[in-house]
Image (cartoon, rainbow, N blue to C red):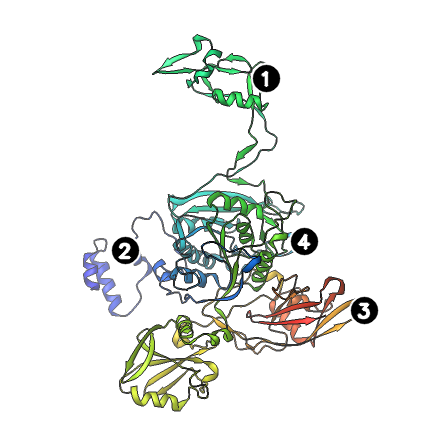
Amino acid sequence: MVFQMLNMNQKLTKQQKEYIIKILQEGKELPQEFKYLLFPTKQKEYELVYAGKIRKEDLLANEDGVFPVPLQIDKVFNGDEHEAFKDGWKNMIVFGDNLQFLKTVYENKDPLIKNKVKGKVKLIYIDPPFGTGDEYDGNKGQKGYSAKRKGADFVEFLRRRLILAKEILADDGSIFVRLDYHFGHYGKLVLDEVFGKENFRNEIIISRSSRPTEKIKQYHTTHDTLFYYSKTSNFYFHNVEIPRINPKWRAMHLPGIRWTEIPKKYHSLFSKKNLVNKRGKIVSRARIILGKEILPPKGRHWALNQDAVFRLEKEGKIQLSVKGNPQSLEGDTIKIGDNWTDIPGYSFYTNYPTENAEILLERVIKSVTQENDLVLDFFAGSGTTAAVAEKLGRKWIVCDIGKLSYYTMSKRILTIQDSKDLENPKKKYGKNAKNFITAQLGLYDLGKVFELQDEKYKEFVSELFEVEIKKHKIAGFEFDGKKGEFPVKIFDYRKFKDSSVDEDYLKQIHAVIGKRLSGRVYVITPANYVDFLTDYHEIDGLRYYFLKIPYQVIKELHKIPFQKLRQPQSKKNVNDLDEVIGFHFIRQPEVKSKIKAKKDHVEIEISEFKSQYYKDEEGVVLENFETLAMVLIDSNYNEKEFVMDQVLFADDLIPKKSKKQEDEEDIREELREQKNIIIPLNKEEIGSKIMIVYVDIYGNEFKEILNI
């Protein structure tokens, strides 16, 4: 086959063909320069080549090791307080890795979103981490994107998500990508490759905050860039108009000679010499302006027809200049161009780092969507996209990998009625959000899984471990499905609640199927129902692999190390979250706390905080408080929803006298030395109940309600 391919290739010389055959026979790698000779690029002017780039086909086939994972509903907000959609739709806040989420949408199998999202998204707006080593300074010195991803790593990070974004967009949909000066030019090339240069629409300049007093040997950076692409040439676009500031009086004529039809009711106002019959229509170059019949200057024509002239006269928008030339006042509105520096690009409504301004999202959403269209943001941050889409009557989905983002967005939507109205910022919006859900992706509540009915449980774990449910028998023993080519048994822990997957259980199965199978057998079971410390048990060369809940799969199975979703321990690293491979289950941290009433305040004393995942990725044991990421507080809990009003990162909880303003390792070292942590609360600012959410560095939570 290889030799036939070489013989058919007309671009290779005889010597090159002989050299390739020799290299292949010796089992060596071919030099890079043969790539385009053997596999020429077709119909492309150029191609981006960089380290770590994978083919689109491999990404969509999950060859990158990132798989779709099921969505699990955390909470539903509906009823009288949250109006329902007529078609049953629910808006969605998703906590989890956006690449996994995009793959779940692309796969289009999850019952929560099946046939509801893929191909129906009219707008995607994203403001991804810029991939720089610099830190973007926001208001009051707060730090936002302190991105770890640089160079080719960031380019590929963005490209993979854009490929999937295009796949789930509606054919008449659009995407807006916000980037800064560090990576805007790279982002443009990636967008050209993914969406096609022919679908590039605009490069829009938007404002960012600046520090003009700082002395630097270059011009101050005062803008970011929005790259606007459509999926196809058939896209929806509405050019938004904005109020014109200080309208000017302009001449009413334009270049070129034109004759305009004059309605019969106005014929008596014109002299006969200025009315001409052309092809059965009475036309003229003149206009009746402020009671006078006036011709335009030589070689020009009037910009307005007679009806428009009379209308503007009534509105007081036509006058004669000092020289007697007609002038009209510019309109009250103007269609916007690609310079949007008339509005802020960032705002600080939620105090979330790098929060996009609502007026910016309003302009974007109005430009390319209509009421009830679906809007998606998978770098959602503070939730501006969701808030503005809600106010404009659009459907929305937002996703982010950060716990702070998740709770910030939830609060923003739950309290949207108290936020500013888009049309009149001096007024409150005044409406509750329509019904929506919060959901987890790749991080699951084990208790909820075990509460599922038998078939639902099997369906859930089969999706989780990529098992094809297909009951079949081997030597009379029934299996529940297949993972690849190997059989899978889902252990019925309800039926055998007093039993476990031990050596006797496996020997009983092996006695029946051992002579009929080779390779491996998978057994899915809750972790506490497995008596083996290892991840597989071998009998007569047949390996029985345990797909445990929590998920603990060895490298031999996945070929890539399992990664947990890490949460920041300081505000400066809020946007410094990495992507996730795999998933894990919620395992509540152990927390010991008590409340103390003082004269003018209340103290929450935390004496212990230990994550169930007590080792880091390198196997180092993490001691008390080292795994604490943040404490979220609702100081006036209404017994219905958690509405966060205070965020304390781990480094905020370190006494100032010993606090270091450095990296996560320094924070961990300081936390390790703490005997307890004190959180003071002002008595005047708290209600009769407070709710506290303690979050570990892997996103696991412990929640408690305290009576004051």
State the image coordinates of residue 497 (x, y, percent, origin top left): 45, 85
Q: Earlier in the sequence, mark 2 or mark 3?
A: 2
Of marks 1 and 3, the one in the foreground: 3
On the image, the x and y values in percent for residue 297 come to: 49, 15
Q: Quadrant of residue 677?
A: bottom right
Q: Amino acid at mark 1?
A: Ser
Q: Which one is earlier in the sequence, the residue at label 3 or at label 4?
A: 4
Pointers 4 and 2 in contact (C-beta within 8 Å): no
Q: Is residue 631 above or below residue 527?
A: above
187 or 3, which lies in front? 187
- Per the image, the residue denoted by label 2 is 37
Counting residues from the start of the chain, the first of labels 4 and 2 encountered is 2
Which of discs 2 and 3 lies nearer the camera? The answer is: 3
Residue 284, given in percent of the width and then of the height, sits at 43, 15
> Which residue position is annotated with label 3?
599
Identified at 50% across, 50% down, the residue is 394
Measured in 3D between alpha carbons, the distance from the residue under mark 3 to the one under mark 4, in whole angstroms, is 32 Å
**Which label belongs to residue 140?**
4
Q: Secondary structure beneath disc 3? A: loop
Give how far apart the Cα atoms at labels 2 and 3 are: 81 Å
Residue at the limit of the structure toward the front, as seen here: 80
Residue 687 lies left or right of residue 452; in this view the side is right
In the rendered structure, are the residues bearing label 2 and label 3 in contact, judged by CB atoms less than 8 Å apart? no
Q: Identify the mark nearer the N-term, 2 or 1.
A: 2
**Viewed as shown, does residue 259 lie left or right of 426?**
left
